[in-house]
Amino acid sequence: MSEADCIFCKIAKGEIPAKKIWEDDDCLAFLDINPQAPQHIILIPRRHIETIAQTQEGDQALLGSLLLAAKSIARDEKLERPGYRLVINCGPGGGQTVYHIHVHILGGRPMKWPPG
Ligand code: AMP
Ligand code: ZN
């Protein structure tokens, strides 16, 4: 999927509305439109990268920023206790439907293992 057709790029540029809950220069977080838990937040880098499989050595700082942002958002959203789940789906077999890397931050209910 090209950047021009990417729904998350459009959200990042403000071309499609979303309930933004946090942003900085590199990343943006907004509520999932089809929540799978009482709290379901999508966290994306502003830069268009299709999947985690396409990241490279040079993306180390960006990937670190994403995880640190996820931690801070979970804390701010009061998910730290009792806990929460971070998910990155990769490719069709991993259940990825939007091809712009994103971290799901899920909380507000007990999470099961193994996931579906
Ligand atoms: P994945 O299946 O890991 O690619 O996750 C994509 C997620 O993006 C799903 O949970 C969708 O509900 C969510 N999503 C798709 N379109 C939008 C949108 N316009 N605003 C917010 N979340 C969206
Ligand atoms: Zn994109």
Image (tube, rainbow, N blue to C red):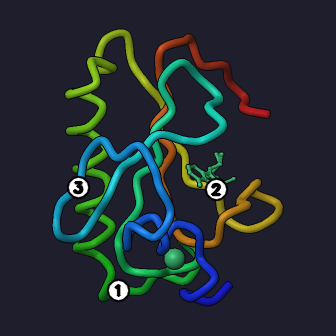
Residue 103 screen position, x and y as percent: 47, 52
Count of number-bearing discs = 3
Residue behind mark 2: 89
Pointer 1: residues within 10 angstroms few (<14), some, or many (20+)? Answer: few
Tell me, yes or no, whether the two marked residues, 1 and 2, touch with CB atoms within 8 Å: no
Residue behind mark 3: 23
Vertical side of 17 occupied by 110: above or below = above
Q: Residue at x 33, y 67 (%)?
A: 63
User: Who is closer to the viewer here, 91 or 114?
Assistant: 91
Q: Nearer the viewer, mark 2 or mark 3?
A: 3
Left or right of 69, for residue 1 = right
Compute the Cα span from label 1 to label 2. 20 Å
Residue behind mark 1: 57
For label 2, being within 8 Å of ligand 1 is answered yes
Q: Earlier in the sequence, mark 1 or mark 3?
A: 3
Q: Residue at x 79, y 34 (%)?
A: 116
Q: Residue at x 20, y 28 (%)?
A: 76
